[in-house]
Image (cartoon, rainbow, N blue to C red):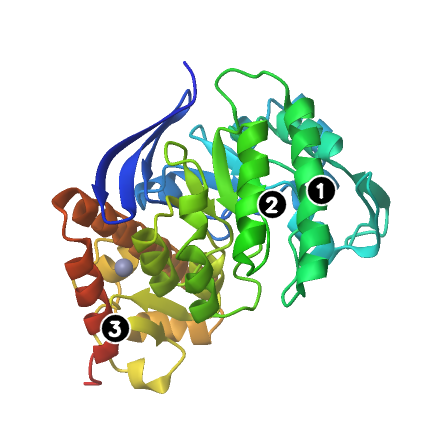
Amino acid sequence: MTFRFDISARDGSARSGTIHTPRGDIRTPAFMPVGTAATVKAMMPESVRETGADILLGNTYHLMLRPTAERIAALGGLHRFMNWDRPILTDSGGFQVMSLASLRKLTEEGVRFASHIDGSRHMLSPERSMEIQRLLGSDIVMSFDECTPFPADEKVARASMELSMRWAARSRDAFGDRPGYALFGIQQGSVYRDQRAESAEKLRAIGFDGYAIGGLAVGEGQDLMFDVLDYAPGQLPDDKPRYLMGVGKPDDIVGAVQRGVDMFDCVLPSRSGRTGQGWTARGPVNLRNARHRDDPRPLEEGCPCPACRNYSRAYLHHVIKADEIIGSMLLTWHNLAYYQRLMQGLRDAIFAGTLDRFAASFHAMRAEGDIDPI
Ligand SMILES: [Zn+2]
């Protein structure tokens, strides 16, 4: 069986469909929980699946350093290693090597760097990134690129984009022909429309199974990100999945889906679950706040997750304040379930042709803010 994307409904620029892979279908628009070090922190993989996730994201940079891609391959690959038998997408390592590693040296060949864990020296290049992602057994492989920093003037952005396009061609060559596995190209070009168009053309000429919009959610703010998303998805092939990397907050996702994006990933729901923040239809709720101390109501009425079905805000407040592990477990579960329910709502609205109404109601609910204290 091969990798295939079917679009079954459209509403404005938005699309809903299915990415078929040998390891299972991915319903789009899709949100991918982040399993950085071969685990979605504080969650069992079967619980992640129960929230409605069809696919996870793994981080090449973290896994190549510890426990190493070679060790994971010897143990049967990442799916078996972490007990997740559904699709996995891995990033190329390019973004994290620039944000986490030290002693970086970027050349045409790739990036030499020292591990943030033990200082050991490594090299990431298009060829090495493809090799690592193949060893991991990733279903969707990302081409190796440089995430252009923000802000970047036109000259800097162009040089960075052109380097990424040369690396995209090398990634394509190194990936080779692997039926059932997909390689995605990554559009760069910062906030410059002509550079984004040129990047899309170069990627299209190389030919990929899907296309990511890179270099956003790097500090430009939502207004500027939406300005770029007003044209960037339309520059990419219509019949392939479009993936907005590292996004985002629920309102970022709703706006990006309206502009034609199909896939997302973000650490926000899992990370904020470990810091006492719960995401609800009425916006974020800080469970550390004393207003929840005596509140017997669930975090979110009607949410089917275990945190809301079986526990009160008062309990969540208590275990988070007491730094009990179950606090992170319950809030992460709720947040991932909230994100997946949001994606289901978006998919249903696209099918029904009511996405604008869905978005209006989404914004109206958030504007109301959290329920009044008891
Ligand atoms: Zn819940």
Residue 314 in view, yes or no: yes
Q: Could you tell me residue 34's position as x and y percent? A: 50, 48
Q: Is mark 1 within 8 Å of ligand 1?
A: no
Q: Sequence order check: which comes first, mark 3 or mark 2?
A: 2
Q: Quadrant of residue 360?
A: bottom left
Name the residue: 63% across, 27% down. 172
Residue under label 2, please give it.
37
Residue identified by numbered label 1: 66
Q: Are marks 1 and 2 in contact (CB under 8 Å)?
A: yes
Q: How far is the residue under mark 1 from the one under mark 2?
A: 8 Å
Q: Amino acid at mark 1?
A: Arg
Q: Is residue 44 visible?
A: no
* 294 horizontally vs 267: left or right: left
Question: Mark 3 sits on what residue?
Answer: 366
| 1 or 3: tag closer to the N-terminus | 1
Checking the image for residue 80, the label placed there is none
Q: CA distance from mark 3 to mark 2?
A: 33 Å
